[in-house]
Amino acid sequence: MKGAAPDTRAVRRALEEAVLEVLETMCFEFPVDEPFLGGPPEAGAVLAVARFDGSARGRLSVALAGQAAPRLAAAFLGLEEDQIGGPEVLAMASELANMLCGATLSRLEPRGRLRIATPEAGRGGAPCSGQDWLHFPLEQGAVAATLEWEEEA
Amino acid sequence: MPSRLMIVDDSPVMRAFVKRTVALSGFETSEILEASNGREALDRLRACPAAPPVDLILTDINMPVMDGEQFLSELKADPSLQAIPVVVVSTDSTENRVGALLRLGASDYVRKPFPPERLSEVLSGLLGPGSPAAEEF
C-alpha cells in the first residue's frame, strides 16, 4: 500500500532544503532572494522530470529558466559557460532532477523504499497540472521545482 | 602509490563531476575507469589482467541494465573481485536501502548531493596512509 501524501508545508520545506543543498554543494550557486511559491515557469525553460515509485509514487519536476541552465552546468562540470552545449545542459538538468528527487524524498520518507527512474529532460512548457512551483531567483535566471504525489487509486 | 579507480554511473555528467572532485581532492590516481552500468563494469573488470583490476569502485544504485545492488552482489560473489572496496554514491539514502547495501558488502556510502570534502574523506579512509589497503603494501 502506498503512503499518504505528506502535508504541503512538509513538502515545501523538504523541497526548499533539497534545492538549496544541491545548488550549494554541487553547483556552488546561492539564490539572490527568498524562494516563493508561484505558477509554472516560463515557456522555453529547460525542464527535467524524475518519476519515483515504491512506498510512494509521484514525480519531481525542475525547470531552469534564463541563463540558469548553462551557468549551473558550467559550475557542475568545472567548465566555462561557452564550453557548454545542449547535451551537457540536458544531462545536467536530468542529474539535478535525480538529486533533488532523492534529497527531497529522503527528508519526507526516510524509511521508505523508493526507486527513482532515469529522469527525462527537454525544452518546453511545464505541465499545467495546477501544482504550485517553488521558485528560486538566481543572479542569472531562476530554478523552479515542484513535487507531485500521486494518490493510490 | 597512485590508485586506480572505477566510476560506475549512467549519468555522464555525474561521472565527470566525480572525476573532477577526485582530481581536486589531491588524491593521486594513475587511472580512472568508467562504466555506465553494473554489467559493463563487471565486463571491464573481468577483462583486466591486473589483480586487482582497480583499487576502489564508486558506484551509483539506480542504473539501467544492471543496477548497483545487483552489481555489488555479483562483485562480492566473485573471488577475483570481492576484495575491491566499493563506495556507493547515490541519491537514494533511505535507511532501508543504505542498510541493505552495507550488508551486501559496500564499504561506505556517499549521499548525493555531497560536498567535495565528503568524497575526499572516504577515499582517504579507504586508500590513504593507515587504511586497510595501504597496509597491504
Image (cartoon, grey):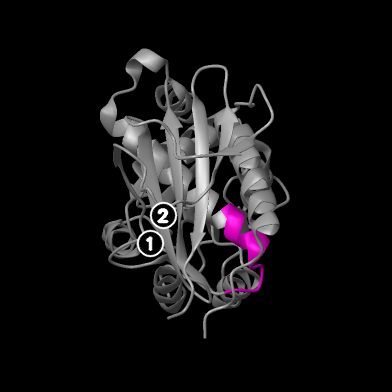
Residue B81 lies in the magenta-colored region: no
Q: Residues within 10 Å of mark 1 (few under 14, many from 20)?
A: some
Magenta stretch: helix, strand or loop mostly: helix
The chain ID associated with circle 2 is: A
What mark, if any, has residue A117 been given in the picture? Answer: 1
State the extent of the magenta-drawn residues as a range. Answer: A103-112
Q: Is residue B90 visible?
A: no
Rendered location of residue A107, percent (x, y): 67, 59
Residue furthest toward the bottom? A1
Rendered location of residue A116, percent (x, y): 44, 62
The chain ID associated with circle 1 is: A
Q: Tag 1, which secondary structure?
A: loop
Q: Residue at x 32, y 64 (%)?
A: B42
The answer to whether residue A91 is above or below residue A131 is: above
Mark with earlier residue (2, 1) = 2
What mark, if any, has residue A50 been given in the picture? Answer: 2
B126 displayed left or right of A48? right
Residue furthest toward the front? A130
Looking at the picture, which amino acid does disc 1 mark?
Answer: Ala
Q: Nearer the viewer, residue B34 or B78?
A: B34
A28 displayed left or right of A83? right
Q: Nearer the viewer, residue B115 or B85?
A: B115
- Whole-angstrom CA distance, mark 2 to mark 1, is 6 Å
Which quadrant does the C terminus of chain A fall into?
bottom left
Q: Are marks 2 and 1 in contact (CB under 8 Å)?
A: yes
Q: Tag 2, which secondary structure?
A: strand
A69 displayed left or right of A145? left
Q: Nearer the viewer, residue A133 or B31?
A: A133
What mark, if any, has residue A6 been given in the picture? Answer: none
Looking at the picture, which amino acid does disc 2 mark?
Answer: Ala
Residue A109 lies in the magenta-colored region: yes
**Nearer the camera: disc 2 or disc 1:** 2
